[in-house]
Amino acid sequence: MHIEEHKSLKDYNTFNIQATARYFCSIGSIEDLKLALQSNIHPDIFILGGGSNMLLTKNIEALVLHINLKGINIISEDKNSVILNVMAGENWHEFVQYCMNNDYGGVENLSLIPGNVGTAPIQNIGAYGVELKDVFLDCNTLSIENQFEKKFTKEECKFAYRNSVFKDQIKGKYIITSVNFKLTKNDHKKIIDYGSIRDELKKNNSHSPSIKEISEAVINIRESKLPNPKNIGNSGSFFKNPTINNIQFEKFNKKFPKAPFYKLSEFEFKIPAGWLIEKSGFKGQRFGDAGVHKNQALVLVNYGNASGKEILELAEKIQTKVKKDFNILIEPEVNIV
Ligand code: EPU
């Protein structure tokens, strides 16, 4: 176990924010993880996965454990499906590519999402009509308090839109060490109704696309709309799409009849935050090195040397203006540290 001090985290968060960890340890085995948790190096522990869903606004005064557990193993399989155990430190998109190369279906719509497998359940990552929960079987965790291993079933995870028990009731109490997925080997359930996927597939004349072709279509769409964190620091959607009730919606719809919306039920409507932010005038705007992406207003970007505080100030400015213009509160999806 190698402990580093005052370690720069710039390469460990996709926003490329400069902040340091008081103590830092890269974890390559469950034994090391237990040892690190039992050590008295610092009373506080901070768990770092792919760093793709957080905004660092200060240095981290804690022992930062970078979860670097690797490995993909087949647990069982039959003619129609396979159960895979994937260690938490595996990169999410590399896992998707492994599945595409083996013709395992279910995660193709989730191609190119930044981050690691172990953090994907925390916010129930989702895109193009699919969420992590659709392929999730269960996950293995370690309790930070007593280092006991505990399995969480799908029900216990309480998955919801960009949310789970790990982000809510038991936040900061367990470390996900691996995830078990159930994927299809044939008769793949292809979800291509999402408008932009169908249009992208049409371009290639794919009427009955393979899961690999769906994955490629998603990659093309994401690359055209979303900035690559390797080139411009960002954390994907910064805000969640807000839900409003039917009374609020009626007023909103009357005033802005052209606004897109998804009807969740008789009483609940979801409004795309990207539309609200664009109409508030922020799309493509830049304030120093902090900005709002030119192709997708939901994504805040770091053009180089923005601090976490500057990004947060921009986010608050957007929140205030959207509230003033539409009387709707948009809330961050990203964890503010
Ligand atoms: N829109 C605008 N202006 C914008 C962005 C969007 O008017 O700048 C409008 C679009 O025209 C469309 C609607 O908003 O009518 C929805 O846009 P889109 O289909 O691009 O999806 P989204 O709601 O902006 C969500 C997820 C994305 C995911 C896409 C595709 C959230 C917070 N975001 O975005 O997830 O890739 O759907 O499924 O739910 C992420 O979580 O990091 C992420 C990128």
Image (cartoon, rainbow, N blue to C red):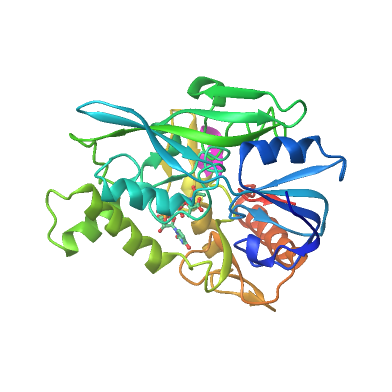
Q: Position of residue 157 (x, y in %)?
A: 55, 26
Dividing the picture into quadrants, the one containing residue 146 is top right
Residue 50 appears left or right of 250? right
Q: Is residue 249 magenta?
A: yes
**Is residue 105 shown left or right of residue 174?**
left
Count of numbered circles on the image: 0
Q: Is residue 193 magenta?
A: no
Main secondary structure type of the part rendered in magenta: helix
Residue 225 in sight in this render: yes
Report the residue at 48% width, 68% height from top.
227
| Along the viewing direction, whichever of 6 and 217 lies nearer the viewer | 6
Q: Nearer the viewer, residue 220 or 263?
A: 220
Q: Position of residue 114 (x, y in %)?
A: 50, 55
Query: Which quadrant of the picture is home to ligand 1?
Result: bottom left
Q: Quadrant of residue 143?
A: top right
- Give the percent coordinates (x, y) of residue 38: 80, 35
Say whether residue 165 is visible. Answer: no
Residue placed at 60% from the left, 48% from the top? 333
Q: Which residues are magenta?
A: 242-251
Residue drawn at 58 percent across, 55 percent down = 52
Give coordinates of residue 313: x percent, y percent.
75, 63
Name the foreground residue: 40 vs 262: 40
